[in-house]
């Protein structure tokens, strides 16, 4: 006789997720909310049609926060099939400024639901916008979690 697995039998593992439609992207957006990075942690590779960010992501999905405190993890956020990139409200010369992700959104072209624009909205009215041929975004944790320097979860006020 076999027994169903229980939630308690699971273990925390690094995230490795992909988004291929707007609904998938909403999940990734919720996971990178409050992720922070600097301008040097962003790379646009036109030959590869890839825009990548190395972010310090708050672990919103962490069920053990009460046990061990708030944690962050270094993650790579990659947008593929990128045709062009633009930004606003970001001083590219200021490599020390910490940028904070509020959300990731998708605006499809009128002709289809695949191509369009992906926008990373940043705190302080900044944004990075990628023109894409097809929606393909991935999020992968690349380090072990570490205690958040602030020792608490981000608070957006109620």
Image (cartoon, rainbow, N blue to C red):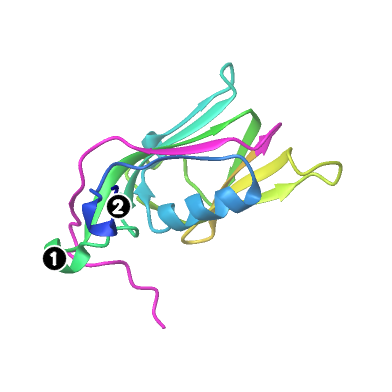
Between 4 and 139, the one lying in front of the other is 4
Residue 155 - label:
none
Please say if 102 is above or below 88.
Answer: below
The kind of secondary structure element at disc 2 is loop
Between circles 2 and 1, the one closer to the viewer is: 2
Q: Nearer the viewer, residue 58 or 46?
A: 58
Vertical order, 135 against 125 (above or below): above
Q: Residues within 10 Å of mark 2 (few under 14, many from 20)?
A: few
Q: Position of residue 88 (x, y in %)?
A: 58, 49
Residue at screen point 64% across, 38% down: 135
Image disc number at residue 67: 1
Q: Position of residue 47 (x, y in %)?
A: 58, 16
Say whether residue 141 is magenta. Answer: yes
Give the dominant element type of the magenta stretch: helix, strand or loop: loop
Separation of residues labelled 2 and 1 (CA atoms): 23 Å
Q: Is residue 133 above or below residue 87?
A: above
Quadrant of residue 64 within the rendered picture: bottom left
Reading the image, the residue beneath label 2 is 5
- Which one is earlier in the sequence, the residue at label 2 or at label 1? 2
What segment carries the magenta color? 131-158
Q: Which residue lies most toward the left here?
A: 68
**In the current view of this chain or complex, which residue is farthest to the right?**
111
Q: Dividing the picture into quarters, in which one does residue 19 lie?
A: top right
Q: Quadrant of the C terminus?
A: bottom left
Determine whether label 2 and label 1 are within 8 Å by CB: no
86 and 93: which is toward the camera = 86
Residue at 42 percent across and 54 percent down: it is 31
């Amino acid at each position: 006789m076999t027994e169903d697995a229980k939630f308690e039998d699971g273990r925390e593992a690094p995230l490795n997720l992909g988004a291929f439609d707007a609904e998938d992207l909403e999940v990734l957006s919720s996971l990178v909310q409050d992720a922070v990075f600097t301008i040097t942690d962003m790379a646009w590779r036109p030959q590869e049609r890839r825009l990548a960010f190395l972010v310090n992501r708050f672990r919103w999905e962490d069920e053990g926060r009460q046990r061990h405190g708030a944690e962050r993890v270094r993650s790579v956020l990659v947008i593929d099939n990128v045709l062009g990139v633009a930004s606003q409200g970001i001083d590219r010369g200021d490599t020390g400024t910490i940028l904070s992700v509020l959300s990731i959104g998708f605006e499809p072209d009128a002709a289809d639901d695949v191509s369009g624009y992906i926008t990373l909205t940043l705190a302080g009215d900044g944004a990075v916008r990628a023109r894409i041929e097809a929606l393909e975004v991935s999020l992968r944790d690349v380090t072990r979690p570490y205690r958040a320097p602030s020792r608490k979860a981000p608070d957006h006020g109620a």
